[in-house]
Image: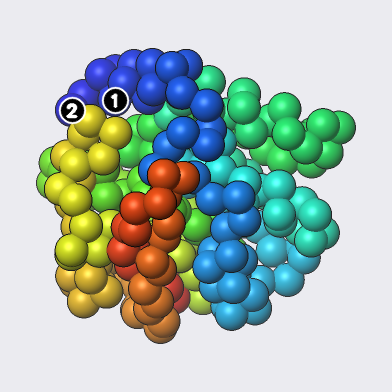
Amino acid sequence: MSELNRQAHWQLVYKEKGENQFSWFQERPNISLALIEAVQADRSSAIIDIGGGASRLVDALVEKGYRDLTVLDLSESAVSIAKMRPGERAAMVKWIVADVTRWGPPRSYDLWHDRAAFHFLTEASDRTAYIDRLRKAVRPGGHAIIGTFGLDCPERCSGLPVVRYDAARLSATLTPSFALVDMRRDDHKTPWGAIQHFQFSVFRRA
């Protein structure tokens, strides 16, 4: 899917649905918070949430006192939803509307977080572009937390095909620049009660 079509798709999706009508909606992103703590990100760590959209991760991080936060998403509608929730504290966050596969990282980050963005990249060229940005953005010794559909998840989400991963498959995609250091399975319960098996993999930048 081209950048323009991808962006138009997500703009429409977020305009048609409320944030709690998406299968991936989480009231509290507990597994992401646990993994961020596990890599020992301190309150001054530079953290970027890729495909953060309307996710509530940034709200939780602001509440915990993290001070260097960036959210990147394709959809301006999704970013607008997220910016409204923290009120005045939204000014503490850097908000970027961009396609990660076309974006140029302006700086380095200590931690790259992505829950359910990478698995939508079904074209090899888009995955290569994503990994190039990941490599440029994460400082040596920094970490990437990537959550994707597991191998036993549906093959489509929000009307789009996805690529499913386990830790070994994702690790093979990101090496040699990133070494797998942790993995966790998350049995995510959708707002309508279905279970989706997410695979979270944690990598350290070589």
Give the residue at mark 2: 1
The quadrant the C terminus occupies is bottom left
Q: Which residue is at a point 54% across and 50% down the rendered structure image?
A: 26
Q: Which residue is at a point 41% across and 44% down the rendered structure image?
A: 192
- The disc at residue 6 is 1
Label 1 sits on a secondary structure element that is helix
Which is more toward the observer, 155 or 62? 155
Q: Quadrant of residue 22?
A: top left
Q: Quadrant of residue 205?
A: bottom left
Q: Residue furthest bottom?
A: 181
Label 2 sits on a secondary structure element that is loop
Q: Is residue 82 left or right of residue 118?
A: right
Q: Are marks 1 and 2 in contact (CB under 8 Å)?
A: yes
Q: Which residue is at a point 59% across and 65% down the rendered structure image?
A: 30
Q: Is residue 53 left or right of residue 6?
A: right
Q: Position of residue 109 (x, y in %)?
A: 57, 57
Asked whether the viewer can see residue 198, the reply is yes
Number of disc labels: 2
Q: Position of residue 40 (x, y in %)?
A: 65, 78
The quadrant the N terminus occupies is top left
Mark 1 or mark 2, which has the lower sequence index?
2
Disc 1/disc 2 C-alpha distance (Å): 6 Å
Label 1: few (<14), some or many (≥20) within 10 Å? some
Q: Which residue is at a point 72% across and 27% down the rendered structure image?
A: 84
Q: Position of residue 63 (x, y in %)?
A: 80, 54
When the figure is inspected, residue 3 is found, relative to residue 154, above or below; the finding is above
Kind of residue at badge 2: Met
